Amino acid sequence: MIRFLAAILLAAVAHCAAADTLTGRVVSIADGDTITVLDTANTQYKIRLSGVDAPEKGQPYGRVSRQRLADSVFTKTVQVEWDKRDRYGRIVGKVIADGRDVCLSQIEAGLAWHYKKYEMEQPVADRRAYADAEVRARDQKRGLWMDAHPVPPWEWRRAARSN
């Protein structure tokens, strides 16, 4: 049991040690959870906001979510804390602008879901903050929670693929 716990602790430390930070200016907003950042060497990076899943462009609140993200970060210098890439090669990271967690802000506004499928990849504090923010947004009927039955983007994408 002690070896098992030590292995988990070692994996967690290695995971934290592998994290990197990218700093750059936001030059494009694809949707409510994807941006493009340009670093000082003029290299562009597609960034998928970690811990959130925003409505797709064709979904209700998709355009509103994208616009809010644009209002929050477009042309600003941001820091992206990341340690993985998704299957499309995008960096998956926590985006910080003006000292604020942009991912969390999208959830607080009711314009993204806490993406529970990947919550175990988040630090415990972020996981709790994101989950709590979603509950508050839902209870206060902010953003997409004004809809009686909002469709999560992962369900919308699955339905779109099956058609």
Image (spheres, rainbow, N blue to C red):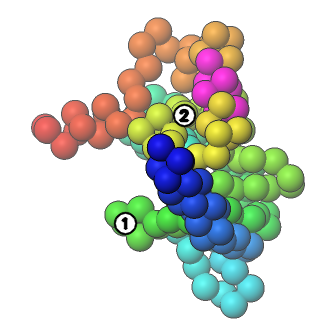
**Residue at x-position 47% and y-position 9%:** 148
Camera-side residue of 122 and 112: 122
Count of picture labels: 2
**Residue at x-position 31% and y-position 31%:** 155
First-in-chain label (1 vs 2)? 1
Q: Is residue 24 above or below residue 140?
A: below
Residue type indicated by callout 2: His
Does residue 8 appear in this view?
no
**Residue at x-position 56% and y-position 17%:** 145
Residue type indicated by callout 1: Tyr
Q: Position of residue 57 (x, y in %)?
A: 43, 43
Is 108 left, or right, of 111 in this rendering?
Answer: right
Is 5 left, or right, of 38 in this rendering?
Answer: left
Q: Is residue 26 magenta?
A: no
Image quadrant for the C terminus? Answer: top left
**Main secondary-structure element of the magenta-colored stretch:** helix
Q: Which residues are magenta?
A: 129-135
Q: Position of residue 19 (x, y in %)?
A: 63, 67
The residue wearing badge 2 is: 114
Q: Position of residue 59 (x, y in %)?
A: 41, 33
Does residue 153 appear in this view?
yes
Q: Secondary structure at mark 1?
A: loop
Distance from label 1 to label 2 (Cα)?
Answer: 20 Å
**Residue at x-position 66% and y-position 23%:** 132
Please, which residue is most extreme toward the front here?
A: 2
The residue wearing badge 1 is: 88
Q: Secondary structure at mark 2?
A: strand
Camera-side residue of 160 and 121: 121
Please, which residue is most extreme toward the left here?
A: 163
Q: Is residue 77 above or below residue 55?
A: below
Q: Residues within 10 Å of mark 1 (few under 14, many from 20)?
A: few
Q: Position of residue 72 (x, y in %)?
A: 75, 49
